[in-house]
Image (cartoon, helix red, strand yellow):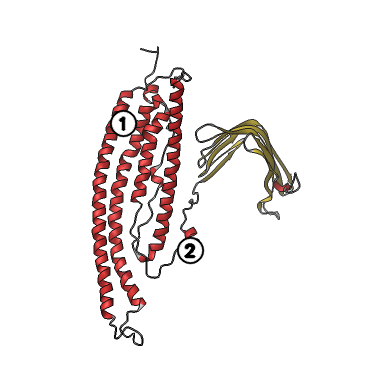
Amino acid sequence: KIKKDAKIAPLVKPRVKLPEYFNQFKYQLPLQCTSVENAALAEEEHIAFRKIISNQFDALKKQMVAVQQKKITEAMQIMNGGGKGRILKKDEFMAQPYYELCGIMYNEIFAEYLKAMVDVGAADKKYYEEMKALETDYQKKAQAIAKAFADREKPECCGEGNTSCCVSDEERCKAYNELANAYLPKFAFITEEWQKKNQLVFTTYFDEVIYWGYLTYHPTGDDNFRLEVFYPMVLQYLTMLGKIGNTKIVKPCKFKPITASKKDSNAIREMECPLEIEIPFIVGKFEVNCEKFSFKAGEGAVFGYEKNFKTHQSTVSVGIGLKLELEAKVGPLKGGLSGSTGETVFITFDGDNKFADGGLKFDAKASAGLEGEAGSAVKGKTEIAKETGVGYTLGINSGWNFNEGPFKGMIGTK
């Protein structure tokens, strides 16, 4: 009715992109203390975890306040006649199809989420009661051990000149450590069950609230989505993690804090990449691994594209290039020289597809090899010189960067 020959499919399935996304599954809870032997490690992991959650919370809270200030400034400008609010782009609808459905879905799912949070409150109360009861039982057993040792240590046989009935440090430590090791798994089990109930709420509702909230608030501007849905949900999630990131720790009699080397050995490291694919073809190369995807093609006119999965940056380059392949045969030996040179203009975009850098790039590469036929002194292919090269990059933001290659120290200043 609005536009002649209009198609419904593009409207029902808009190519939307969430302005921000928060991966709730990247935050792994630290291990529970299940014995006095892992008390030091558990303590260090929980301290580090709380620090991470606190830093994340503070950073996002700061971002939220900045957006709030921005909205206040915009509102003041509109009130004073200096702003017009959000202006629709050409051919843009104020509300996407099924806008009313999006609002209904968001409101109903958010109501379910709030109801589930009430149930979590009841689970929290039960958890604290169970932990308190178990702690009371544990302390009674510890006091009983202390009393038994005190009853044994009579003044006449445990004092100056006579220590025949004194309890040794080894016996005392063994008794207390065994008691702790009997109760710590019980504390851990109760805590882990409580943690699962808290996490289940966000596993069930977090992504759906974000999704339908975005579709509901997007027509009025992404800042409204951030303030009304995104930041509140993420901050509530981090608050929940800070609450459940807890464990009962009982240190052994002879407690040794983790040394720096052991801390390093338990640090979170990136796994080794199991993916490494490189496919060259006549005038180009396709490459993909855990860090990036890149595609380069062309001789004469050169085109390149690279996407970094870690920084989320993408780079597009266009320019000119030349590839050289020389080959000669002398008797049973065959030798070759290959090289390439190229000069391109590049533009780099950040994770939000905003301009990050741009400029010029030049590089030149060369390699040489030798191949022997059957019966010759050279067996198979032999690499005479590995691929090497020189070049430079001149970027608006990155500045001048020169790759001296094999001429390092001979070109330019040291």
For the residues labelled 2 and 1, say whether their Cβ atoms are less than 8 Å apart. no
The percent position of residue 281, horizontal first and vertical second, equals 59, 38
Q: Secondary structure at mark 2?
A: loop
Residue under numbered circle 1: 106
Give amino acid for label 2: Thr
Give amino acid for label 1: Tyr
The percent position of residue 186, horizontal first and vertical second, equals 27, 60
Relative to 170, residue 328 above or below: above
Residue under numbered circle 2: 259
Quarter of the image for residue 344 reads top right
How much space separates mark 2 and mark 1, taking CA atoms? 49 Å
Relative to 11, residue 230 above or below: below
Instruction: Decide if residue 300 is in sight here.
Output: no
The percent position of residue 393, horizontal first and vertical second, equals 66, 38
Residue at 29 percent of width and 34 percent of height = 110
The percent position of residue 257, horizontal first and vertical second, equals 44, 64
Location of the N terminus by quadrant is top left
Residue at 27 percent of width and 49 percent of height = 124
Mark 1: few/some/many CA within 10 Å (<14, 14-19, 20+): many
Q: Closer to the observer: label 2 or label 1?
A: 2
Q: Is residue 118 left or right of residue 321?
A: left
Instruction: Decide if residue 54 is in sight here.
Output: yes
Q: Which residue of the protein is positioned furthest toward the bottom in this rendering?
A: 161
Mark 2: few/some/many CA within 10 Å (<14, 14-19, 20+): few
Residue at 27 percent of width and 72 percent of height = 145
